Amino acid sequence: LLLYPVYALLDWQLAAPEDLRNLLVTRAVFAALTLALFPVVRSRWFDRHPHRVSGLCLLVGAIGISVVTTLLEGMDSPHYAGLSLLLVASGLLFVWPARMVISTHLLVILSFLVPNLWSDPEISAGLAASNVFFLVVTSLLVGVGQVCAHDAFKAQIASQVIVERTRANLEQAHAQLKELDQFKSRFFQNITH
């Protein structure tokens, strides 16, 4: 959300005057959509479906960037790099299971391909292929990292559960040992009297 105004300033400086209005309107619309998702983060639905909500937030950003690419140079647009940044940010922020990583990353890539192919079916292969390749490779690298982080997180939780169960068993055994020790002390007291 913080990057929308920064990129709007960049558009103000670098974009062609005839593109500026469409770019600023697009950024404003997707900033508003992102803001509209904020209340969902504090809802019960988020508590039950955190992966879906975080994936939805990522997709809103991806669609916003992809719309900008259709307004400027299409699949040749350097703005596609924003999608790579978005994928890297998702890898740093979200610990997702494999199914969520695959579906979300695929939708991010499709958010770039579909509108650009639809708006310009006569795309030149050179730079567009390079941009798509870089986006796919970034997605794969980040996705592998996310899945590994998720698996490590699950293993850590499983280890914590084992430690907690062991601690509970030791506490129970300690309580039984104390009880047995008290019984033994009473037994010897009774014998000596």
Image (cartoon, rainbow, N blue to C red):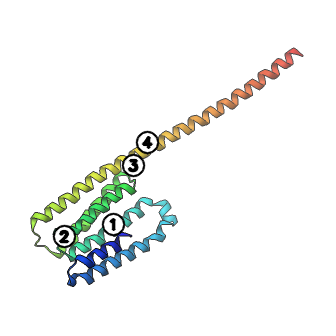
The alpha-carbon separation of the residues under discs 3 and 1 comes to: 20 Å
Q: CA distance from mark 3 to mark 4?
A: 9 Å
Q: Is residue 10 left or right of residue 169?
A: left
Within-10-Å neighbours for mark 2: few <14, some 14–19, many 20+: some
Q: Which of pointers 1 and 2 lies earlier in the amino acid sequence?
A: 1
User: Residue reaching furthest right?
Assistant: 193
Where on the picture, by quarter, is residue 76? bottom left
Residue at image mark 2: 77
Q: Are marks 1 and 4 in contact (CB under 8 Å)?
A: no
What residue is rendered at 33% in x and 66% in y?
59
Please give the name of the residue rendered at 39% of the width and 77% of the height, measured from the top-left corner: 32
Task: Name the mark on residue 59.
Answer: 1
Q: Mark 3 — residue?
A: 150
Q: Nearer the viewer, mark 2 or mark 3?
A: 2
Tell me the element at label 2: loop
Comparing 104 with 139, the one in front is 139
Question: Eyeballing the image, is 98 above or below 122?
Answer: above
The span from disc 1 to disc 4 (Cα, nearest Å) is 28 Å
Work out whether mark 1 precedes mark 4 in sequence or the reverse, and give the earlier one: 1
Please report the residue visible at 30 percent of the width from the left and 53 percent of the height from the top: 142
* Mark 1 element type: helix
How packed is label 1: few (under 14 Cα within 10 Å), some, or many (20 or more)? many
| Residue farthest along the front direction in this orientation | 13
Q: Which mark is residue 155?
A: 4
- Is 183 placed left or right of 137 in the picture? right
* Residue type of the residue flagged with mark 1: Leu
Q: Is residue 142 above or below residue 173?
A: below
Q: CA distance from mark 2 to mark 3?
A: 33 Å
- Residue 51, quarter of picture: bottom left
State if disc 1 and disc 3 touch (CB < 8 Å). no
